[in-house]
Amino acid sequence: MRITGYRTMFTVQDWGRAVGDANGVFAKGRTTVPIVVIDTDEGHSGVGLGPHTDIETVFAAVDGEDPRAVTALYDRMLRRTFKAGHAGTIFGTIGAVDTALWDIKAKAAGQPLWRLLGGRDRRVPAYASGLDFGLTDDDLVTAYQSYAERGLRAAKLKGGLDVDRDRDRLILVRDVLAAAGNGARPGLMLDANESWNRKQAVRHVAELERHVDLIWVEEPVRRWDAEGLAAVGRGVRAAVASGENLTGLEQFRPLLAASALDIVQTAAVWGVTHFLRVATLAHAYDLPVSPIGTTPIGLVHAATSIPNHIGSELQDLRPPTGLSIDLSIEDGAFVLGDSPGLGVRLDEDVIAALAHRPEATDRGPHIRPERAGHRLVPNGSQETPTTMIKTL
């Protein structure tokens, strides 16, 4: 079997509500989903969800190769891009191709990827994550009731600008999940998306911990600040989680050496091989791992095969437009199906008819605010939840 070509396309995730974090909000709730498809001479095609940046360079490393040599091809892609730096969106392109190759390998074997990777249990514990920063209290309750109906009893909220608002929202969601669970204590997490400096993080989380029990606080300071993350960890009861925006083992190593992380995360967009390697590194430090992503299907499969998975992020309950995925959400878990590969099917006619192309925007959760980490009074800045919402 040989790799013969690739195709790229874009679809959308239609959330049906505003989505965003402390850095910005998309009011219309439509986000771009890039897709890479890798084709072979034996008719097997693989799907990867991730960027297309510099795809010609990345694809040159795998063109004409046997896709079943996926881990060796992953390293070929890293070597092909090492001068420019295999990070950021280029690392995402590598991850998308890598995931597509795993999809092909499992399809060729006639097995679901979770089984090919050595998984035993098709159920993968999940927690709810609504990208909910721009929601009113009523909409917040409605959103998390829909998660609770699927059996989820742990939730991660977006916050970081207003400690009173964060407290009230956490309590609202706690009560929703507790009611659904007949009073059982739910799990709560807060994601600040790198919006604080070290002392702000400790003060903010310590105040929240007077009222709610937090499992973890996510990205309280900059992702690479090993000393800062460790300082936050020493100053609060909650665990410190980070890693979704780190690319390559070389970026994780100093954080783990500094005991800066309690929960090691990796984004679905970076690919299956990266996740497996990060999970092994974290396991050497006796740390749990947690996959992050809007459609984390590749990492959900991979999570079945590692010993230190703690829970996977579940964002939207519906797949992107033009995609169907062989999994269900039951009793608080992803339940993977038996379709060969990832179990992802594309309706390319629907995607083509959508004719979606990403638009450049000047506001949103992908742009760091000018005063992030430098606000004397966080909720007194001009970047409040209301003014951050822009119709896109």
Image (cartoon, rainbow, N blue to C red):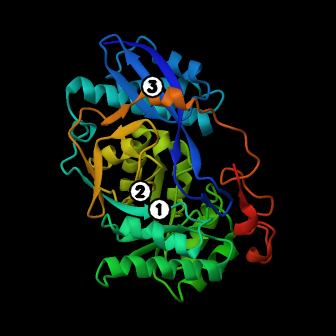
Q: Residue 129 carries which label?
A: 1
Q: Which of marks 3 and 1 is in front?
A: 3
**At 42% from the left edge and 57% from the top edge, which residue is drawn?**
313
Please indicate, yes or no, whether residue 141 appears anywhere in the rendered image.
Answer: yes
What residue is disc 3 on? Answer: 349
Task: Name the image quarter holding residue 110.
Answer: top left
Above or below, 318 against 184 in this view is above
Q: Where is residue 219 in the image (x, y as percent from the top left)?
A: 58, 62
* Amino acid at pointer 1: Ser
Q: Where is residue 136 in the image (x, y as percent from the top left)?
A: 60, 72
* Amino acid at pointer 2: Leu
Q: Considering depth in this image, is 103 or 295 the residue closer to the camera? A: 295
**At 24% from the left edge and 32% from the top edge, which residue is drawn?**
340
Q: Nearer the viewer, mark 3 or mark 2?
A: 3
User: Which badge, 3 or 1, is on the more N-terminal residue?
Assistant: 1
Q: Is mark 1 on a helix, strand or loop?
A: strand
Task: Name the image quarter holding residue 380.
Answer: bottom right
Task: Name the image quarter holding residue 288.
Answer: bottom left
Q: Quadrant of the N terminus?
A: top left
In 3D space, how far apart are the residues under numbered discs 3 and 1 (Cα atoms)? 30 Å
In 3D space, how far apart are the residues under numbered discs 2 and 1 (Cα atoms)? 6 Å
Seen as rendered, the residue at the extreme bottom is 210
Q: Considering depth in this image, is 229 or 109 the residue closer to the camera? A: 109
Image-based side of 24 in relation to 141, left or right:
right
- Residues at badges 2 and 1 in contact (C-beta under 8 Å)? yes
Q: Which mark is residue 314?
A: 2
**At 49% from the left edge and 41% from the top edge, which residue is drawn?**
269
